[in-house]
Image (cartoon, rainbow, N blue to C red):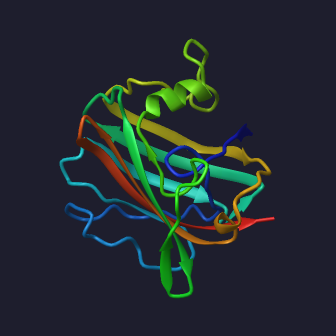
């Protein structure tokens, strides 16, 4: 069991019924995210020309429990090497009754912009050190550049540690959109919907 932690696009979330979202047929972000309240779902939201595409993603349990264990499987394909600088823009919303409220960026959690994802990865896993499991076993890189190709993570267990989340980021239903770009060119866009349950 490995440690996992952070906000969307940087690290954390999960669920146990191997549910799987479906990529948007066709092309762009005008295709809405599965409009359900509760339950895990995902879709690609970028232009169909985006070089990086999420092929599959499942998480368990649902809702995601913090602290708790998290099982993730995923597959990604990339037709282009992703090199520094990589920028990630997150939009995080929480359901409040029938409304979706955008959460602010506070202490690098919420609707944040990360201008240099490669440096963040280097800070988490110092260059020259071996990538942690299960990335190492499955040949998934943990530093820039990320070479073009297909990457697959079979169902793997992680541990979500007990962390003090802001009050606005505890129990509830969330949806997140992350867009990754380099030099102004969008490389990938993914939407997620999930439920959190903190203990």
Measured as percent of width and height from the top left, residue 84 is found at: 36, 26
Quarter that holds the N terminus? top right
Task: State left or right for residue 33 relative to residue 107.
Answer: left
Vertical relation: 156 (above or below) 111? above
> Which of the 4 image quarters holds residue 30?
bottom left
Quarter that holds the C terminus? bottom right
Q: Say which residue appears at 49% left-offset and 47% top-offset.
A: 9
> Which of the 4 image quarters holds residue 147?
top left
Please name whichever residue, 111 or 125, is drawn nearer the observer in this view of the structure.
Answer: 111
Q: Say which residue appears at 66% left-offset and 45% top-offset.
A: 5
Measured as percent of width and height from the top left, residue 194 is found at: 56, 66
Q: How many marks?
A: 0
Q: Say which residue appears at 69% left-offset and 66% top-offset.
A: 170
Measured as percent of width and height from the top left, residue 56 is found at: 43, 52
**Residue reaching furthest bottom?**
98
Task: State left or right for residue 31 relative to residue 151.
Answer: left
């Amino acid at each position: 069991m490995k440690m996992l932690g952070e906000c969307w696009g940087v690290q954390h979330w999960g669920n146990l019924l191997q549910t799987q979202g479906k990529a948007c047929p066709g092309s762009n972000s005008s295709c809405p995210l599965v409009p359900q309240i509760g339950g895990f779902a995902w879709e690609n939201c970028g232009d169909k020309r985006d070089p990086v595409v999420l092929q599959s993603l499942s998480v368990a349990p649902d809702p995601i429990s913090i602290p708790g264990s998290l099982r993730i499987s995923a597959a990604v394909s990339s037709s282009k090497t992703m090199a520094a600088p990589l920028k990630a823009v997150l939009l995080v919303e929480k359901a409040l009754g029938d409304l979706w409220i955008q959460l602010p960026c506070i202490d690098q959690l919420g609707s944040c912009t990360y201008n240099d994802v490669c440096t963040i990865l280097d800070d988490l896993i110092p260059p020259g050190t071996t990538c942690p499991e299960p990335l190492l076993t499955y040949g998934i890189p943990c530093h820039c550049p990320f070479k073009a190709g297909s990457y697959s993570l079979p169902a793997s267990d992680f541990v979500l540690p007990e962390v003090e989340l802001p009050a606005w980021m505890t129990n509830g239903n969330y949806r997140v959109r992350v867009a990754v770009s380099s030099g102004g060119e969008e490389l990938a866009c993914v939407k997620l919907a999930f439920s959190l349950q903190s203990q």
